[in-house]
Amino acid sequence: MNEPVIDPVLLCLSMTSHQTAQNSLNSEVIPEARITTQKTQSNNYDKLQHAALKKLCRERNLKVGGNKAELTQRLLLDDQTSPVPGVSTSGIFSPPSVQNRLDSTAIPAIPNISSSQSDETLNVAFVTEVLRESESLVGYFDQGLESVDHEEGEESDEEAEVAAELANATELEVVDNSTTHAAIIWADNFILETRRKGGRQTEMSVLKQWKAWVTTALDTGIIPDMIIDSIHIIEYLKYAATRNLFTTHGAKKTSTSRLSASSLKKIMTMLGRVRRRQEDTDPSLITKRPAKNSRTDDFFKALMVQAQRYRLESADFDITQGTILDSQLRPEQFDKITEAILTKLTQLPSIIKAHFSWTWQCATLNRSDEVVSMTLVSIHPYNLPLPNYTYQDGRISATGREVFGVLAMFHETKTAQPGKTEPVYSFALPHRDPLMCSVSALAILLHFMFDQKDLIGRVSNWNWMDSTTWQTHHVVFGKNVNEPMGGDGLGRMYSSFLDFTTVNSTKKTHLARRTMPSKLEEMGVPADQVDATGHWQGNTRREVYSSKIPKAAAVALAGFPVGESYYVPWSQVPVPDALQLKLYPFCEDALALLRAHGCKNQGMINFLILLL
DNA sequence: ATTGGTTTTAAAGAGCCCTC
DNA sequence: GAGGGCTCTTTAAAACCAAT
């Protein structure tokens, strides 16, 4: 269980109007008593190996990068700032630590700080880290969010400057009384705990960008304070919609140069959330400083339109790329995938896991997160009564034979309101093609875990009699049997075998879920049953997965009623070469030229191909 | 190859409007 | 006035990226 992290939204709002996240940190004092426990703790960490330290960091929700010294340093900092030093606090009752706050805005790690240092140096290190962070936030904005190389020599001046700023910040009064403050923190942690990692990451990422902007915008007087009113929203949207985009480490993005419409939406959502908390603190804002008016609404809509247009105008635009249309597998590609899994992968566990997850996805249409989060207890044998025969009036017998299959039950992870959803079922029957059979793939996987390699035997706390043992171990395991595989891990596994096929879709773990619905429809399965299999609600599947080209309608509009096969006799008439060359004579040359120059504009190439 | 962080895409939910 | 269906909003998963 991860240690709770304070919701960044609330973190911002626990500050008074002129304070920034960095400033507020200064009010935290490291109790001396804790530091004295440091030494002994530090020695303990020294004895641990790199991997063990990493694991500790992960448990405490700290960053896990860096060398041993950095990891030790991080853990020590966490000890200082956690209520109970050296003990990983779990549960929602523990107040958030300063380290957690720092983490929420991604501090760069401090290199080369040895673990055996005096109390003063630890304090200095801590302050340096805070300073460095506020510094980098300012730097990010000044240089269009490019990463900043810290010159060692220059730091002292800037440090002094920011330190002075921090000192001023402490003079701002804090109005919370401690009891209400604790209650709010408790509630915030509780709220945050129900969010998933990805959601938290998204929010933090958006907030980080916003906070960086706010820091500079306050300095330059663009906005008077942190209250999100209509002008604030317009100013920030203006910045967000036109800013340069950079990769994680500061290189300019080549794939896109503007935020997408959905990212802008996300920004508005986040601003709205912060604003609501601001209104909680000061209800008079609702009338004094309204956040929305017709202009903010219209401006936002105009930006969305611009973002959509911008996408269509970008140079490398290919109309099918990244959509459902470029990841519909053809039957021969299914065969190639199966072949690649069984013959091209080199590690036996990978083959077994890949074979199971691919066939299971083909049989259940599960998303990858559903596959990796499936625990051992959630799968059961089940005899499915199958209809046996059809009555004369067309009714089908419901008392037929029973066929053996595997049933899996779980809660869907991707729900907007966790807890509101019913558990869902997936069911897989043995496939008519043994190589595509998910049930036998599962049998092989379990045989490998329990018998052949006895992987379970290596799990120290494995208890056959304890249900939690079965509940905490996953069918698709990660590096070891007792470690779950992450969604990204599955994605990489898929990449490794798809490299050997002609599948070039970027949607690796979603292939089966994208292709099987149309296959099922072609095989005559009613639409509602297709929806039920993939757990799609309403018209989601039609809208997202297969509606873009309604095939039956397209064929019917070409003059062929449903049921009649599509055949256009006149298209078979051979066209003389001489005539072909007379049409668009520039085409071949232009295409060859583009290809020779490694043209990346797929749209242009596709158009020339159309002319041919 | 891993990994942590960022951006894009999938898809669920809220609520409005229209029809019967 | 119930409920279906549609649009808009919101949230989570998937993909991407580059340092290590």
Image: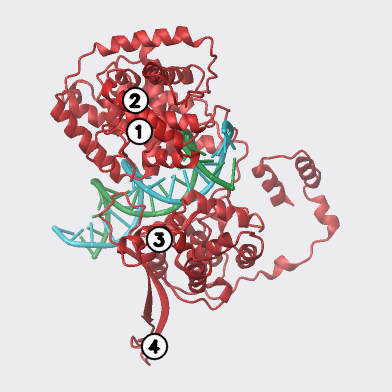
Chain colours: A red, B green, C cyan
* Residue hosting label 1: A268
**SS at mark 2?**
helix
Residue A128 appears anywhere in the view: yes
Chain letter, disc 1 residue:
A
* Residue hosting label 3: A374
Q: Which of marks 3 and 4 is nearer the N terminus?
A: 3
Asked if the residue under mark 4 is in contact with the one under mark 3, i.e. CB atoms within 8 Å, the reply is no
Label 2 in the same subunit as label 3: yes
* Residue hosting label 4: A401
Chain letter, disc 2 residue:
A
Q: Which of marks 1 and 3 is nearer the N terminus?
A: 1
Chain letter, disc 3 residue:
A
Q: In this view, does A513 lie to the left or right of A183?
A: right
Q: Earlier in the sequence, mark 1 or mark 4?
A: 1
Q: Name the residue located 41 percent from the left edge and 38 percent from the top edge.
A: A57
**SS at mark 4?**
loop
Q: In this view, does A609 lie to the left or right of A403?
A: right
Asked if the residue under mark 4 is in contact with the one under mark 1, i.e. CB atoms within 8 Å, the reply is no
Q: Which of marks 1 and 3 is in front?
A: 3
Q: Name the residue located 33 percent from the left edge and 12 percent from the top edge.
A: A166
Q: Where is residue A260 in the image (x, y as percent from the top left)?
A: 47, 36
Chain letter, disc 4 residue:
A
Q: Position of residue A270 (x, y in %)?
A: 33, 33
**Residue sitting at the far right:** A578
* Residue hosting label 2: A233
Q: Earlier in the sequence, mark 1 or mark 2?
A: 2
Residue A207 appears anywhere in the view: no
Which three-letter amino acid code belongs to the residue tagged 4?
Answer: Arg
Asked if the residue under mark 2 is in contact with the one under mark 1, i.e. CB atoms within 8 Å, the reply is yes
Q: Which of marks 2 and 3 is nearer the N terminus?
A: 2
**SS at mark 1?**
helix
Q: Position of residue A159 (x, y in %)?
A: 43, 11
